[in-house]
């Protein structure tokens, strides 16, 4: 008997990390111009940006159905495996609830509501995979991830409030005010899954990105283990320089990078930047 680690596609462990760590992925669904696609496997953020530029209409996202989770859980449990499924923030999607519905049919499937998403969720998924590879049981993994999810730090730097406005997360006044003053908000996603404005940066985008990285690196109590530098898509030279800043700081044992998928991109837009990590 083994342990299977699974997650929905909001974990942003793409294109290769989910394969490298043997993670089973249940994709969300993205509807664009009336046609529905499987997140990551059939559509990516570049297609969303191109469609938005043409239509100024945001795509619709929807959670995997309970049947999608049931099929995965049944296949793995029939093969003799326990399952630990690590879900995105239940306040943003019904993905967690649908996984719980499916898990009720099994005695050995554990479902975690991470109260986060993107590579913050990914950090927890990779920790679960590390524990699996170290021979820990599904219950031990589940119990540890329930603790670790309360220590994840997620501060999201936005370049624009346009996507947040069209998605109902910002008012028109906030959007125009930020654009006029060249303000770029840093949003805190706390460990209860609630999003608030933590700080507002002002200046040109490359300058603000560097100031943001310094601001996050100066925060105390990082566990020094694994961090992710993630973007929804930005100038590659700038992104590489920001990643190097994090690596040169020596603050983390491992610094990974990721391109955020559709579930985050839809709500934040291009040029979003996040340094994800866990506290002690």
Image: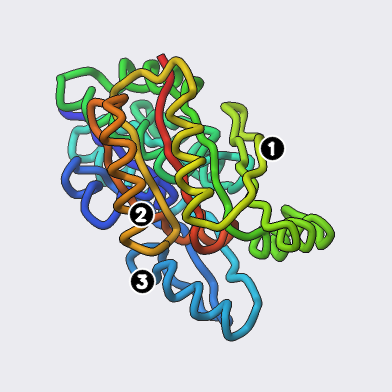
- Asked whether, in this view, residue 231 is left or right of residue 33, the answer is left
> Of tags 1 and 3, which is closer to the observer?
1
Q: Residue 10's spot in the image, x, y percent?
A: 44, 50
Q: Residues within 10 Å of mark 2 (few under 14, many from 20)?
A: many
**Residue 42's mark?**
3
Residue for badge 2: 239
Mark 3 neighbour class, 10 Å CA radius: few under 14, some 14 to 19, many 20 or more: few
Q: Is residue 59 left or right of residue 259?
A: right
- Residue 198's spot in the image, x, y percent? 66, 35
Label 1 with label 2: CB-CB less than 8 Å:
no
Dividing the picture into quarters, in which one does residue 223 lie?
top left
248 or 220, which lies in front?
248
Give the quarter of the figure containing the N terminus.
top left
- CA gap between label 1 and label 2 equals 25 Å
Q: Quadrant of the C terminus?
A: top left
Label of residue 69 in the image: none
**Rendered view: 256 above or below 47:** above
Residue 196's tag is 1
């Amino acid at each position: 008997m083994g342990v299977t680690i699974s997650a929905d596609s909001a974990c942003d462990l793409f294109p290769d990390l989910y394969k490298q760590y043997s993670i089973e992925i249940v994709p969300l669904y993205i509807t664009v111009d009336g046609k529905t696609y499987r997140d990551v496997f059939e559509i990516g953020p570049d297609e969303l940006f191109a469609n938005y530029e043409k239509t100024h209409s945001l795509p619709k996202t929807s959670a995997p159905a309970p049947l999608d989770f049931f099929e995965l859980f049944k296949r793995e449990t029939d093969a003799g495996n326990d399952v630990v499924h690590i879900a995105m923030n239940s306040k943003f999607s019904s993905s967690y609830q649908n996984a719980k519905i499916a898990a009720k049919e099994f005695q050995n499937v554990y479902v975690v509501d991470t109260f986060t998403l993107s590579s913050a969720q990914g950090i927890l998924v990779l920790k679960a995979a590390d524990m699996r590879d170290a021979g820990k049981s599904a219950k031990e993994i589940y119990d540890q991830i329930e603790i670790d999810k309360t220590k994840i730090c997620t501060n999201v730097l936005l370049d624009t409030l346009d996507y947040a406005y069209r998605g109902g997360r910002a008012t028109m006044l906030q959007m125009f005010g930020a654009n006029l003053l060249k303000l770029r908000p840093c949003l805190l996603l706390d460990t209860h899954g609630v999003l608030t404005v933590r700080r507002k940066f002002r200046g040109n985008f490359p300058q603000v990105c560097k100031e943001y990285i310094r601001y996050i690196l100066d925060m105390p109590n990082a566990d020094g283990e694994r961090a992710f530098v993630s973007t929804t898509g930005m100038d590659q030279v700038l992104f590489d320089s920001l990643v190097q800043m994090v690596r040169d700081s020596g603050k983390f044992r491992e610094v990974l990078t990721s391109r955020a998928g559709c579930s985050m991109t839809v709500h934040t837009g291009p040029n979003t930047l996040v340094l994800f990590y866990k506290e002690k």
